[in-house]
Image (cartoon, rainbow, N blue to C red):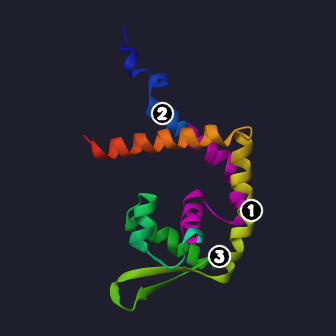
Amino acid sequence: MADDSLRLDEFLCFAIHSTAHAINRATKPMLDQMGLTYPQYLVMVVLWGKDDQTVGGIGEKLFLESSTLTPLLKRLEAAGYVQRSRDPSDERQVRVRLTDKGRELHCRAGCIPDWFREAFDGDMDEARELKSRIVQLRERVLRHPE
């Protein structure tokens, strides 16, 4: 008889993973209208929160390595949403700034949080509690990687 702990429907990580995919599928049409992928949208959210950040700073917030982030930033720059430049005070650092077009996109992005509120039937206390518990789990996992 199989060990129940190895059944897919018992995996918390799969429940989180498949829920993330479901959210990505649901929000994809909205992101397509903005010309963004979900990872690009997350970069933009970070910059809308605070413009003019280093690639390393953005990567820390998104839990992404610069080798993953750089191609995303290049595509955002090609689309005209951001501008990348070397930091004059430290040439090793690349700074990322929103363009006017990137700032304008912020207004159009309001549909994503609206969709999320609807997914929780407006119960944002439930949404905040769930997010808090997931973040707590992430922090525990990061403290105990093995």
Q: Name the kind of residue labelled 2 in the image.
A: Phe
To which residue does mark 2 refer?
Answer: 14
To which residue does mark 3 refer?
Answer: 102
Is 55 in the magenta? no
Question: Looking at the image, which is closer to me, 62 or 34?
Answer: 62
- Looking at the figure, which quarter contains the C terminus? top left
Name the magenta segment's main secondary structure: helix
**Position of 100 relative to 8 (above/below):** below
Cα separation, mark 3 vs mark 1, equals 14 Å
Ranked by sequence position, the earlier of labels 2 and 3 is: 2
In what element is the residue under mark 1?
helix
> Which residue does the image show at 71% across and 75% down from the upper left?
104
The reply, left or right, for residue 115 in relation to residue 125 is right
Query: Which contiguous range is marked in magenta?
Result: 19-47
In what element is the residue under mark 2?
helix
Numbered tag placed on residue 13 in the rendering: none
> Which residue does the image show at 38% across and 67% down from the upper left?
67
To which residue does mark 1 refer?
Answer: 33
- Rendering coords of residue 76 (x, y %): 58, 73
Q: Quadrant of residue 102?
A: bottom right
- Rendering coords of residue 94 (x, y %): 41, 81
Ranked by sequence position, the earlier of labels 3 and 1 is: 1
Cα separation, mark 2 vs mark 3, equals 34 Å
- Rendering coords of residue 15 (x, y %): 51, 32
**Position of 56 relative to 64 (above/below):** below
> Which residue does the image show at 70% across and 55% down from the upper left?
112
Q: Name the kind of residue labelled 3 in the image.
A: Gly
Q: Quadrant of residue 61?
A: bottom left
Cα separation, mark 2 vs mark 1, equals 29 Å
Q: Name the kind of residue labelled 1 in the image.
A: Gln
- Looking at the figure, which quarter contains the N terminus? top left
